[in-house]
Image (spheres, rainbow, N blue to C red):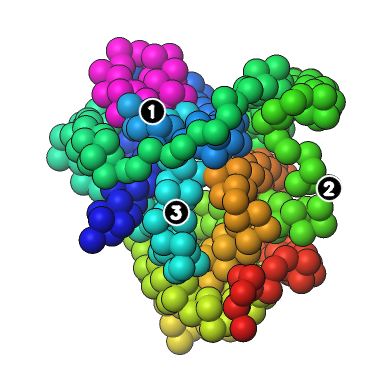
Amino acid sequence: MHRYLVFATVGLSLLMYAIDSTVVSVAFPSFTRDLHSTVLWSAWTISIYFIAVTVTVPLAGKLGDSLGRKKIFLISLVLFTGSSLACGLAPSIGALIVFRFIQGVGGACFVPTASGIVADEFPRSREAAIGLFSSIFTVGAIIGPNLGGWVVSRYSWRSIFYINVPIGVLLLGTGVLLLKDSRTLIRPRIDLAGFALLCGSMLLLMFGLNLAGGGISQRSILLAGLFVSAGLILAALFFRQEKRAREPVLDLALLKSKPFVAANMTNLAIGMTMMGVFAFVPLYATSVLALSTLMSGVILTPSSVAMCVSAAATAFLLKRWGYRPPMVIGFAGVALTTMLLAPGPLSVIMGDRFGSIGGLLLLLSFYGIVGGMVFPAANNAGIELMPEKVGTVVGLRIMFRNIGGALGVSIITLILHLNSNPGTGFTIVFSAFGLIFLVSIPFLFLMPVGRRGWT
């Protein structure tokens, strides 16, 4: 019973993090109006959270493996809960952006440390436990927009942050009582210079990508080029620093291994397509298929539900199937679905029998099924490369997926800006990113087939 209570504790923390990743977009118009802000500044409340997660996850995974997962998990809860209260009390848009960054730092620590805790509690059924744990993201994607819409319409945008406070306090209490202290044999050396260079590089690259995606003008292209160039210079300095550091933030030996390179490339593709492309499905539904705003949000629910069920079922069947078959089937299915979502193929396949809503629902439901097969298999295959450092591996995985998501969003925005006809723009987007996912399949054959010791 103890380990199931531990799973519930860390699972609820991850659910809280997953909900906050999506719920702010619903409250966006409300706090823009109430804080007398512009759309440009308000958008950073979403971007800064994404940036904080990206730059913090690698360090969080390393700290969890060295200092102890319980300690880092509880610190992350304090940061997340305290910053949630501060976000609700924010007097200005600048303050809200700062508090959202701190909230992202706290949230980023949940994933690698909580994954390590689950792996420790379920050593014999790790693959099923990690698979179920991963499906919590999908549940958060379902709850977030619906809960946010209800809370904002019934109360105010500040209430979406206040909800986290009692939940966070409860989790702090259960975490102190239930989680075990990890024995730390050595005192870790933190590569502060490497961490600063990584943060600076990611921030500048993200700023550049956001500027590039914000509009096409001579000034925006120049500024984006400067930010990206500066970010790449800091990235080069970061890799130089990591070669010399005794305790590097990023173990470069992992990047030299072909299986780890394959895992990172597949995570980059997952971020670009499964996080980047499908973030634009609501816009596609309204601008091309002429659906209502309400329906453009509701239409994602069947996909999320299908993905949650599929991920849970795949997690329990991994011991029988292994990791590779679900990954290959999932990647091929997602690639096919993405390409079929383009206006031309969608109308040809579905015709007038289902209409645009029916056709889109069917394709997105199929996407949820095949996409749900990818996550538990890919997550466990990555962990299998270095099971003694679960937090570090999970941190790398999330970092590359977030980079892929940011890159995908910026490229998609540029494509849509360059095409005055939304239908043409989305045809290019769905076709190109579906092809990217398809050509990523060979990388899957460099990753583990199954867990060591399976027959």
Could you tell me if residue 3 is visible in this image? yes
Q: Earlier in the sequence, mark 1 or mark 3?
A: 1
Magenta span covers which residues?
79-103
Q: Position of residue 443 (x, y in %)?
A: 77, 65
Q: Secondary structure at mark 1?
A: helix
Q: Which mark is residue 75?
A: 1
Q: Position of residue 389 (x, y in %)?
A: 60, 47
Residue positioned 28% across, 40% down in the render? 175
- Check disc 1 and give the amino acid type: Ile
Q: On the image, numbered disc 3 is attached to which residue?
A: 120
Horizontal arrangement in the rendering, residue 373 relative to residue 291 (left or right) = right
Crowding at label 2, few (<14), some or many (≥20) Cα neighbours within 10 Å? few
Query: Separation of disc 3 and disc 2 at Cα?
Result: 27 Å
Query: Separation of disc 1 and disc 3 at Cα?
Result: 19 Å
**Secondary structure of the magenta portion, mostly?**
helix
Question: Viewer-nearest of labels 1 and 3?
Answer: 3
Residue positioned 70% across, 17% down in the render? 193
Q: Earlier in the sequence, mark 2 or mark 1?
A: 1
Query: Separation of disc 2 and disc 1 at Cα?
Result: 32 Å
Q: Are marks 3 and 2 in contact (CB under 8 Å)?
A: no
Closest to the observer, 229 or 453: 453
Q: Secondary structure at mark 2?
A: helix
Q: On the image, numbered disc 2 is attached to which residue?
A: 256
Does 100 lie within the magenta span? yes
